[in-house]
Image (cartoon, helix red, strand yellow):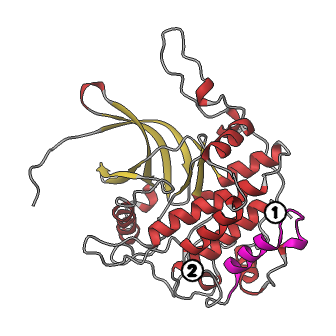
Amino acid sequence: MALFSIQSDFRYDIVRKIFEGGMGVVYEAEQHGARDFVKRVAIKIVRPNFASQKTFIENFIGEAKLVADLIHTNIVQTYHLGESNSVYFICMELIRGVNLEQFTRQLFVKKHPLPRELAVFITSRVARGLAYAHAKTDKDGKPLGIVHRDVSFKNIMIAYEGDVKLTDFGIAKARGFLNDQEGEVVAGKADYMSPEQADFQITDRRSDLFSAGVVLAHLLLSKNIFKGETAEESRNRILKMPIPDFTSLDPRIDAGLDNILQSCLTRDLGRRYATADQLMHDLEYYIYHSGYGPTNETLGRFIRELFGLTPPAAAAADAHGKTVFLEETARMRGSEPRPPAAP
C-alpha cells in the first residue's frame, strides 16, 4: 500500500525529430514541470497507422512496463508511459550522441579506422547491459527471462561523453510483458539475428550473445559478413555460412580475440557463451589484463573528435555565464554523404 499519492501532469514540447522507424517516431522534447522546471527527454510515439492495432499497442505498453525498471548505466532509461488524444508515447532518457550505424558511417566518411580496443570496449559495455537485463527478476524474485532479440547497430547508442547504451526493447521477449509469437514469426534485423531466430526457433539469452558477436565483428572489420542483398540471403548466411578464422581477415585480430568471436558466433549452443557475464569478462580481460585500457572518457574523446565537437571541459560559457549545450552537427542531421554499401 502506498504511503500517499501525488497527482501531477507534465507538458511535453516537441523540439525536433531524432529517428523515424517503421512503427514509431522518436523526438527530442522538453518536459515541463512546476516553477519553470524543464528537462530534455526523448519521446517515442506510435505511428498513427499502428495506433489502432490492438496487439501492437499492447506490446508497446508491454515494452514500457518492461524497461521501466531496467536501471543500468548501459541501458537507455525509461521515465514515463503516457497517453494523449488516444496516442500512446514513452518518455525516455535523451542520449546526446549517435547510434553505431551513424558512428561507423562517420568513420567511413572521415577515413578514420576504429581502434581495436575501442571496438572491444563498446561490445563489453553492450555485454554489461545484457548481463543486467538477462538477470532481471520481478518484484517476487522470479526471473523475467528477458531476451532483447534486436542487438544491432541501430539499437546501440554512444553518447558524446563516451557512455554506451543499449536501447529499443520493442521486440524483446519477457515473461508476462510482450506477445512475442516466437516460433511463428521471425523478429529482429536479419543480418544481426542468431541462427535460432533465423530458423524460427525458441530463443534464450544466448541468442543475444550471438548478435553481440556480430556487432563486435562488424566493428572490427568495418563490414557485416552476414549481410546479404536481401533479408532472406542474410538469414541464409547466418544459418549456413562457415564462420571464418578472423585472424585471416584483419591483422589486428589475434588468436585471443578470434577465440572470443568464435565463442559468440558458434551455432552450437552448447559451445556458445552461456551468459553475458562470461562474454563481458573475456572482453574486459582482453583489453585490461596487461594494464591500462580504454574508458568512457577515451571513447568520449574519440567520438567528439570524430564529429568535430568541443570537449565538455573546454566548452565556454556565453557572455551571460550560461551553459553552452552541445548540439548535433549539421552532418548528423542528415547532410553528410552516405558511403556506398559495404561489400
User: From the viewer's perspective, is 268 left or right of 168?
Assistant: right
Residue 149's place in the image compared with 26, above or below, is: below
Between 152 and 275, the one lying in front of the other is 275
Res 153 visible: no
Residue 8 in percent (x, y) is at 19, 41
* Amino acid identity at mark 2: Arg
Res 10 visible: yes
Identify the secondary structure beneath mark 1: helix
Q: Residues within 10 Å of mark 2 (few under 14, many from 20)?
A: many
Q: In which quarter of the image is the N terminus?
A: bottom left
* Residue 32 falls inside the magenta stretch: no
Residue 316's place in the image compared with 57, above or below, is: above
Between 290 and 86, the one lying in front of the other is 290
Mark 1 or mark 2, which has the lower sequence index? 2
Residue 58's place in the image compared with 321, above or below, is: below
Question: What label does residue 206 carry, if any?
Answer: 2
Q: How crowded is mark 1: few (under 14 residues within 10 Å), some or many (20 or more)?
A: some
Question: What label does residue 130 carry, if any?
Answer: none
Provide the major secondary structure of the magenta segment: helix
Residue positioned 66% across, 73% down in the render: 190
Q: Mark 1 points at which residue?
A: 221
Disc 1/disc 2 C-alpha distance (Å) = 23 Å
* Amino acid identity at mark 1: Leu
Residue positioned 86% across, 64% down in the render: 343
Between 278 and 71, the one lying in front of the other is 278
Identify the secondary structure beneath mark 2: helix
Look at the numbered discs 1 and 2 and tell me whether their residues touch, using CB distance below 8 Å: no
Magenta stretch in the rendered image? 247-267
Query: On the image, which quarter does residue 246 sit in?
Result: bottom right
Residue 94 in percent (x, y) is at 48, 43
